Image (cartoon, rainbow, N blue to C red):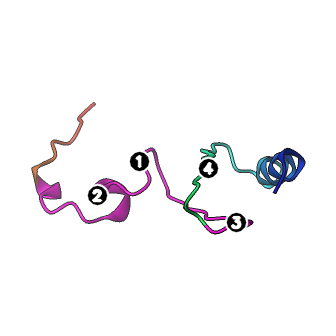
Amino acid sequence: MDIDDVIKMIDGKMESGVSRLKVSFDDEQEKDTVKEQYHHGRCDVGSPWAKGTVSNCDAVDSVED
């Protein structure tokens, strides 16, 4: 995959309505493969909040107006 392919992939995401991207490269990943992760909200991808695995979510204070 060369830089033109990466730019085309990013442009395609933007045109389809994706508003945020994080692009990283991994030397250990199989050549010419792509791994995508998606999440809702502003949580970090892979965090317990994003995965829904927080065990004490009842302890979170609610915000009142």
Quarter-of-image position of residue 16 = bottom right
Res 37 quadrant in image: bottom right
For residue 31, the mark is 3
Q: Are the residues flagged by discs 1 and 4 in contact, CB closer than 8 Å?
A: no
Residue ID for mark 2 = 48
Query: Which mark is first along the chain, 4 or 3?
Result: 4
Asked if residue 33 lies in the magenta stretch, the reply is yes
Cα gap from disc 1 to disc 3, whole angstroms = 26 Å
Amino acid on which the number 4 mark rests in the picture: Phe
Which residue appears at 68% of the width and 65% of the height? 34
Asked whether residue 45 is drawn in magenta, I would say yes
Amino acid type at mark 2:
Pro
**Secondary structure found at label 3:** loop
Q: Which residue is mark 1?
A: 44
Q: Earlier in the sequence, mark 4 or mark 2?
A: 4
Q: Is residue 34 left or right of residue 43?
A: right
What's the CA distance linking mark 1 and mark 4? 18 Å
Residue sitting nearer the eye, 42 or 1 = 1
